[in-house]
Image (tube, rainbow, N blue to C red):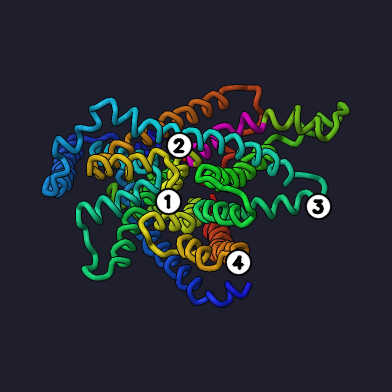
Amino acid sequence: MEAVVDELPVILGAFWLTVKLTVVSGVISLVWGIVLAAMRVSPLPVLRGAGAVYVSVLRNTPLTLIIVFCGLGLGTVMNVQFSRDDLSLNSFWLSIIGLSAYTSAFVCEVVRSGINTVPLGQAEAARAIGLTFLQTLRLVILPQAVRTVIAPLGTLLNALVKNTTVAAAIGVMEAALRMKNLFDAHGDAIIPIFLGFAAGFVVLTLPMNLLAGRLARRLAVVR
Amino acid sequence: MTERGATVLYDVPGPRTRLRNNALTLTFGVVLLLVAYFVWTKFDEKGQWNGELWQPFLRADTWTELILPGLLNTLTAAAVAAVLALLFGAVFGIARLSDHRWVRVPAAVVVEAFRAVPVLMLIFFAQYGGSLAGLVVTEFAAVVFGLTVYNGSVLAEIVRAGILAVPRGQAEAGSAIGLRKNQVMRLILLPQAVTAMMPAIVSQLVVLLKDTALGFVVAYADLLNAGARVVPANYANLIPSVIVIAAVYIAINLALGYLATWLERRSRRSRKVSADPAAAEMAGGEVPLVR
């Protein structure tokens, strides 16, 4: 137990990195996922095809492989750099590319399923008053679609928090890798350290789930 | 489904829209080609399309010596973890529906706790915790432990949702003809629930298969390890190798995905199942099955 108390600043630092990874890649994948969903329902076959290929490739590839590709492939082989002198900052942004690329495919599918729940009449009414495709999507369909998929988006965010641990594969010192390091440093306190980190994840995900549930109920579209 | 979602949003194009759509198709086609060309030249600058980097994948020994053993390890870990996770899920899913508080509450705590913890942390914990207890924990055992406990907990939720989705009358009718609780569960509820939940179960097994790649982090000799460590160590071709390995993963997962869709269509057609797969699916499942 003392080990957890002694290392508390280190543990909190690791979770702060987890939170940063989650927030940054969460925002990027939400935006990119909605763009992908718009592509997949657009009248242009080129965009529909490109969106469909992107989603089925990214969804069926293990996240670890994507992160390794970003870290070693883009980072080491292709020499993509975000910071010349800070290696940890580099792997931080490379893992964000991986996490966002992967999560956005799931966001796209969730938003698209939400679009399917919007009644036909809504889009027809929008067209009848002369809105274009993008206006229909932006003003009528997406506001209703996103409201209906808040609960599944919450599930995705929850999964994203846990998925940030995969960044450990390219050496980002987030919660899981830090926990392993603390295991090495305090061989006698493995169970307290594990419980501490597990509690950290519960603390991160539990309020999020409650909030998502409440938002989903409050913003539900009454039909 | 896709088609319905797509046609809701726009009318059948008239002559002017068709012209505009053609122009936009051309524009976006050119943009996409430019993006592809940009990526291609960036990789070309680093010599990633050189023949000798891709050559190894045309030789049989690369596959038989380096890649297929990794694939075999991935499939073994996935198969063992899948069987154990299904058992775990069935036991805890049913336990959460028990009439006895002292069974229901601990089962709920276990399921909720393991669902909240990332698989990678469970794998690390298995390694270190196991050696603390004096056990020799191989990488295989650690990976299987992590995958079993996490996916088992998710499957428990799926099983529970499936059982709850069977109409109440089924269980009542079972009790009315004098079946015991365990008979009602075994003979009436479970068979219908499992049929209804099959698509969600299969898609969770796809997640499990994908998650075996986490073994890479603890150096389990799986497919990703073969593609990102072993092959590049021999031929210095990390990017080509990772791309080939990704194609293998995608092929396997797409096949499993089609199996899930086929199972779902079949269970929708079948009149014997009274539980509605769609309703059951909404109630549980880690990543929503999006059709």
Who's the residue at 21% across and 58% down the image?
A80
User: Which residue is label 3 attached to?
Assistant: B102
User: Which residue is label 4 attached to?
Assistant: A189
Q: Nearer the viewer, residue B233 or A170?
A: B233
Magenta-highlighted residues: B193-207
Q: Chain of mark 4?
A: A
User: Could you tell me how far apart the alpha carbons at marks 1 and 2 are, in whole angstroms?
Assistant: 14 Å
When the figure is inspected, residue B57 is found, relative to residue A6, above or below; the finding is above
Please state the horizontal and vertical placement of residue B185, each as a whole percent of the image.
76, 33
Circle 4 SS class: loop
Pair 3/2: label in front: 2
Q: Nearer the viewer, residue B56 or A133?
A: B56
User: Could you tell me how far apart the alpha carbons at marks 4 and 1 are, in whole angstroms?
Assistant: 22 Å
User: In the rendering, which numbered label is found on residue B217?
Assistant: 1
Left/right placement of residue B224 relative to residue A206 reads left
User: In the rendering, which numbered label is found on residue B74?
Assistant: 2
Circle 2 SS class: helix
Q: Residues within 10 Å of mark 3 (few under 14, many from 20)?
A: few
Left/right placement of residue B9 relative to residue B220 reads left
**Do badges 4 and 2 share one subunit?**
no
Pair 4/2: label in front: 4
Left/right placement of residue B170 relative to residue A142 reads right
Give the farthest residue toward the right.
Answer: B178
Pair 4/1: label in front: 4
Name the magenta segment's main secondary structure: helix
Residue B197 lies within the magenta run? yes
Circle 1 SS class: helix
The amino acid type of the residue labelled 3 equals: Trp
Would you say residue B88 is visible in this rendering?
yes
